């Protein structure tokens, strides 16, 4: 910047955080590592996915964990033609809010559907886990959701 | 809801927006540090009403250190005011509109008569798409690094699917906002482009085309709040805050109805917005479709001028764009262009948290 | 966290690694850039407040007590006074200096604020408040707009400063 009086420098900040996950999030992440999807019973019997220690609408404690999925319905989606460096997929994909079978709330993740014309709200999708040996108990254990029936 | 509870956000002690100043909003100010950006704006907000830092009893600021990657930048920013001898001072990791709320609460308690509120944010030094992902749930959402445009696009799609809006509506809002911004000397993006032309834009993240996104902005702003004698002395036509409230919704995106804003509606109700008509609304809708959601939540009809300043589509200085809405609304009351106005600020993904401020002239 | 590559018996997941890496293009602003460019010339540059007359080094562009721009550039001396100090005996990751070493606040002649510097060429147990020190710079062709241009401060042999001359800067 030749006309600039101020100096400039690039600067990298790194936070090597490690978080305790607690019993509810821990159970969900353990489930992911085992190739299962879990929700939690909310205070009015609804099933919250991803599960929280409290009901997001009432603030009450949540109850038992239940199996949900592996299929679900796309509640909304957004097509990413040019994935950003930290996005879950390197090829064009959709972000989607997926309401898994048995759940009353939606989970945010990527849908690998091939193209924007292959996806619509209300479509059924199913989970695609990473291979068991690569799973560590994190959201990335889900590689993506894919159209049910394997259109992609 | 009881009458007492519903009036909780309404003013007991009259407090006015005595002065407002903002920097010219730009895409990138890489000449100045935060102190250097703030100093002229703080000088202007005091100078416009002929006061100094010694005339305010409290200082509150809004900013986020993540934006420049500089820990405790809000502490060094105080050098722009020169807080000696020390004054009561506070900071929120929020838009300045929430700093203003804190100062307003303190003024309600009656211990102080005047406060300086300022905010600063530079979007240019870092990668906003990554930085804003850090405000999301750290277990389930942030590790996927969804960017704010993608999350807003999910909301826009839900709005379209619900039959509440079309892409043409988004373009019309963008076109109107940037045309109105032609009369705003501090606007960053101002032009007269028909909505039909805007619809030729590429999608950034479908269904949001480029025009439906806010610009990336570096900016700062400041307001002086005053009560009692000071409010009268410092302004010939004070803009009084008659109601002020803010509410938050769950951060679980999949547990919210993204097509409506219950927190905005509740804040508006508690701030007494519907007690009378408003002439203008300054709404902090960073993405075009969010204006539709907010207009509905605020219960505004088509007699209300929406965002005469151009709004956040004309300039979206992070941490300041909400406070600027309040300043713009107050300016129009003080100048006589409006008698009653509502200003709104938002924070978080997809309008998670919302603040409503009702202002009136005399 | 349980690591599937090193253990057969995977217990429940109890922690989640959430590393964050962010890249920035930082500017220190106009005033601090002048200070840094001064270092590149082998000198300390400060700025004077037009209201109270105090000289800040480095200046962030404003007087922190008056809140006004500091516009007058002031070249400061290469010598100063140790106002206070500590002796570091604790090793830590990334340490590049042999312990024990002295970390001191140095009030440069002509400045109204001290800044932190390393003191060398003196045994750690001989440092004292009021000691007069001078900056030792890197070789001229190694100078950069960075505090790394100052290798350290060392005693310059002058008699100690009178406590009265620096007591306001502790």
Image: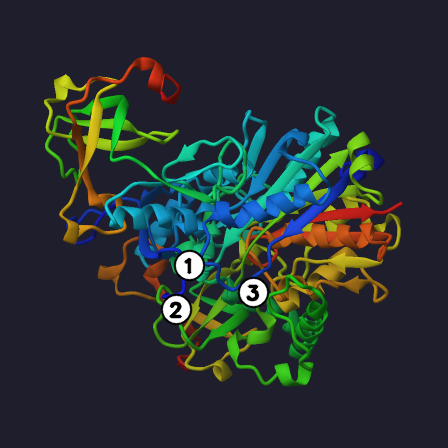
Q: In which quarter of the image is residue C42?
A: top left
Q: Please report the residue visible at 72 percent of the width from the left and 26 percent of the height from the top.
A: B109
Which residue bears the numbered disc 2?
A84
**Neighbour class for label 2 at 10 Å: few (<14), some, many (≥20)?**
some
Q: Are marks 1 and 3 in contact (CB under 8 Å)?
A: no
Which residue bears the numbered disc 3?
B152
Asked whether residue B270 is in view, the answer is yes
Please give left or right for residue A131 compared with residue B99 in the image: left
Cα distance between the residues tagged 1 and 3: 15 Å
Residue B29: percent from left, percent from top: 48, 59
Closer mark to the observer between disc 1 and disc 3: 1
- Quadrant including the C terminus of chain B: top right
Q: Which mark is residue A56?
A: none
Asked whether residue C17 is in view, the answer is no
Residue A130: percent from left, percent from top: 29, 65
Most foreground residue, C148 or B213: C148
Cα distance between the residues tagged 1 and 2: 9 Å
Q: Please report the residue visible at 53 percent of the width from the left and 78 percent of the height from the top.
A: B203
Please give left or right for residue C6 compared with residue B46 in the image: left
**Secondary structure at numbered mark 3:** helix
**Secondary structure at numbered mark 1:** helix
Whether callout 1 and callout 3 share a subunit is answered yes
Which residue bears the numbered disc 1?
B130
Residue C165: percent from left, percent from top: 34, 18
Residue B167: percent from left, percent from top: 64, 77
Q: Do the residues labelled 1 and 2 touch (CB within 8 Å)?
A: yes
Most foreground residue, C130 or B291: C130
**Secondary structure at numbered mark 2:** loop
Cα distance between the residues tagged 2 and 3: 16 Å
Q: Quadrant of residue B101?
A: top right
Q: Please report the residue visible at 67 percent of the width from the left and 32 percent of the height from the top.
A: B56
Disc 3: host chain: B
């Amino acid at each position: 910047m030749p006309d600039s009086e101020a100096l400039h420098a690039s600067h990298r900040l790194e936070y090597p955080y490690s978080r305790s996950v607690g019993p509810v999030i821990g159970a969900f992440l353990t489930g992911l590592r085992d190739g299962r999807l879990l929700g939690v019973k909310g205070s009015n019997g609804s099933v919250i996915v991803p599960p929280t220690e409290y009901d997001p609408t009432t603030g009450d404690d949540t109850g038992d964990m239940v199996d949900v999925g592996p299929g679900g319905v796309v509640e909304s989606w957004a097509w990413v033609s040019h994935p950003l460096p930290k996005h879950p997929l390197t090829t064009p994909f959709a972000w989607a809010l997926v309401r898994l079978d048995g759940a009353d709330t939606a989970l945010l993740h990527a849908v690998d559907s091939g193209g924007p014309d292959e996806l619509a709200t209300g479509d059924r999708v199913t989970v695609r886990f990473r291979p068991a040996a690569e799973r560590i108990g994190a959201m990335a254990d889900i590689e993506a959701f894919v159209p049910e029936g394997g259109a992609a | 809801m009881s009458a007492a509870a519903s009036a909780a956000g309404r003013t007991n002690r009259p407090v006015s927006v005595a002065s407002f100043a903002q920097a010219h909003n730009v895409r990138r100010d890489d000449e100045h540090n935060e102190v250097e950006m703030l100093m002229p704006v703080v000088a202007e907000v005091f100078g416009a009403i002929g006061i100094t830092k010694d005339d305010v009893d409290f200082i509150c600021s809004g900013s986020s250190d993540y934006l420049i990657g500089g820990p405790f930048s809000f502490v060094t920013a105080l050098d722009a005011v020169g807080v000696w001898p020390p004054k009561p001072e506070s900071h929120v990791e929020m838009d300045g509109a929430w700093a203003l709320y804190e100062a307003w609460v303190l003024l309600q308690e009656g211990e102080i008569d005047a406060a300086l509120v300022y905010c600063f944010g530079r979007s240019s030094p870092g990668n906003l798409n990554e930085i804003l992902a850090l405000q999301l749930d750290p277990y389930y959402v942030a590790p996927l690094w969804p960017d704010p445009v993608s999350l807003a696009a999910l909301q826009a799609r839900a709005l379209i699917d619900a039959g509440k809006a079309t892409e043409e509506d988004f373009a019309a809002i963008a076109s109107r906002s940037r045309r109105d911004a032609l009369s705003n000397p501090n606007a960053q993006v101002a032009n007269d482009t028909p909505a039909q032309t805007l619809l030729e834009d590429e999608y950034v993240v479908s269904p949001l085309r480029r025009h439906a996104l806010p610009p990336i902005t570096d900016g700062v702003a400041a307001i002086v709040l005053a009560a009692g004698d000071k409010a009268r002395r410092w302004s010939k036509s004070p803009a009084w805050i008659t109601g002020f409230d803010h509410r938050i919704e769950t951060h679980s995106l999949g547990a919210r109805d993204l097509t409506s804003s219950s927190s905005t509606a509740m804040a508006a109700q508690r701030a007494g917005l519907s007690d009378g008509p408003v002439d203008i609304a300054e709404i902090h809708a960073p993405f075009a479709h969010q204006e539709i959601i907010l207009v509905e939540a605020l219960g505004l009809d088509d007699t209300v001028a929406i965002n005469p300043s151009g709004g956040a589509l004309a300039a979206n200085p992070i941490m300041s764009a909400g406070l600027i809405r309040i300043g713009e609304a107050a300016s129009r009351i003080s100048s006589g262009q409006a008698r009653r106005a509502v200003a709104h600020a938002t924070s978080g993904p997809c309008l998670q948290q919302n603040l409503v401020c009702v202002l009136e002239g005399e | 966290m349980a690591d599937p590559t090193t253990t057969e018996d995977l217990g429940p997941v109890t922690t989640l690694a959430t590393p964050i890496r962010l890249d920035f293009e930082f500017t220190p602003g106009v005033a601090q850039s002048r200070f840094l460019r001064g270092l590149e010339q082998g000198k300390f540059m400060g700025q004077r407040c037009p209201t109270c007359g105090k000289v800040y080094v480095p200046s962030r562009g404003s007087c922190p007590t008056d809140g006004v721009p500091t516009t007058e550039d002031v070249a400061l001396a290469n010598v100063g006074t140790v106002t206070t100090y500590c002796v570091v005996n604790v090793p830590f990751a990334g340490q590049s200096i042999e312990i024990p070493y002295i970390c001191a606040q140095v009030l440069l002649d002509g400045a109204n604020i001290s800044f932190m510097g390393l003191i060398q060429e003196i045994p750690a147990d001989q440092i004292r408040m009021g000691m007069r020190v001078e900056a030792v710079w890197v070789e001229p062709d190694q100078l950069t707009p960075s505090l790394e241009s100052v290798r350290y401060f060392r005693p310059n042999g002058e008699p100690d400063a009178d406590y009265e001359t620096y007591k306001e800067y502790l």
